[in-house]
Amino acid sequence: MEGQSVNPSPSPPRWQALVGALALTELVSWGILYYAFGALVPAMQAELGWSQGFLGGAFSLALFVSALLAVPVGRWLDRHGPRGLMTLGSCAGALLVAAWAEVEHPLAFYLLFVLLGFPMASVLYEAAFGALVGFLGSGRRTDRALLVLTIVAGFASTVFVPVTQALERELGWRGALWVLAAGLAVVTVPVHWGVLPKGRAGLEPGGPGARLEPGAPGRQEPGGGPGRLYLCAAAFALATVAGTSLGVYQVAILVEQGHGAAVIAAAAMVFGLGQASGRLLFTWLRPRYALTTWSGLLFAPGMFGLVAVAADVGAGASLAGIFLFAMASGGQTLGRAAWTLELFPVASFARVNGVLGLWSLLGRAGAPLALGAAHDLVGSHRAGLVALALFSLLGGALAWRAAAGRVR
């Protein structure tokens, strides 16, 4: 019941320890399981003689497997809690990264990345969000926890890309992977096992954890029906397609526009600042506006930013467009959790978030291939950027429709 003060979650020191632990493990897991791959592609290509397309195909395959596992992972988290699954995912990730260091045959390489889809699904954002919400329920404290988690994890590329490159220069790419595998095991396995809750954190369907804490921006409904769920999934999948495509091809787009190394470096910094700004602003302003208003505030800046980049009228306009887009993308990371918390029962968060994660991860896996194919077809990234801007517009419309009323 809205306005009733119910706080079923544990004492503050315990939830702060959980948030800190997950922020650390997400930083390390994203850095090693996701961002290290791109940093090692040139070295792997030089030694193994495989094309970038072949190497990238293996990584896309891991993302597809991760997407297919998103719903089963969400169901497990709803029923059993995060400790066992996330610890097992950390162990599997460390072992598979070590096996990656010894790979020689193309088929073994692809099989390895099929298996890597499991730790990606069980330790990255979808699982971490499910663990936090299962422990804290809904409310401003959850908003702050998700903000801390995503801000810290957002530095994964900033930390681990240069670290991986430095390790590769000193030890070769195989030696670098052995060190990263050890780091993943030493940091994430004991933290996941020692800090995460063993089972569910007292949130049962219809129980007190399904109610809003004071300060939450809307009323929990008993459910939204499959129509509302699919609208949410499609909205944030379109946002993921746009975000992944620009993230992968940002350097290529700026080079195509004739910008030099200074602008490219500035764009990387601007993108990171934009994402952090979007997350901070969304957490601060979220209670002031309904989800229908946020449908415009979260998606429209991304559309205008992509149009600004596509226009190619100068470095300043491109950097401003990248900042606008990154700000929207950063807010959307938390926005997906907000739509899930407000439109569906809290006790089903992990399962619903798994469905949304499935669609978003499929979009993430296919986005680089789609934008690359569009570039090859027309000889420029401009058409693809305009298409992504339309995707952002459509995503906002679908998010508004999901929030505006009950859809069956």
Image (tube, grey):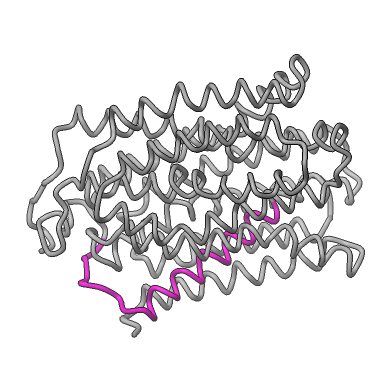
Quadrant of image for the N terminus: bottom left
- 160 vs 327, nearest the viewer: 160
Q: In which quarter of the image is residue 400?
A: bottom left
Question: Which residue lies at the image location 72% right of the left edge and 19% below the top edge?
Answer: 166
Q: Position of residue 247 (x, y in %)?
A: 68, 49
Is 45 rendered above or below residue 250? Answer: above
Q: Where is residue 88 in the image (x, y as percent from the top left)?
A: 40, 39
Question: Which residue lies at the image location 25% right of the left edge and 73% below the top edge?
Answer: 223
Is 395 rendered above or below residue 258? Answer: below
Q: Which residue lies most toward the bottom here?
A: 408
Decide whether residue 208 is among the magenta residues. Answer: no
Question: Which residue lies at the image location 10% right of the left edge and 59% below the top edge?
Answer: 207
- Asked if residue 27 lies left or right of residue 380, the reply is left
Q: Quadrant of residue 96?
A: top right
- 252 vs 277, nearest the viewer: 252
Quadrant of image for the C terminus: bottom left
- 63 vs 368, nearest the viewer: 63
Q: Quadrant of residue 221?
A: bottom left
Magenta range is 218-246
Is 358 rendered above or below residue 155? Answer: below
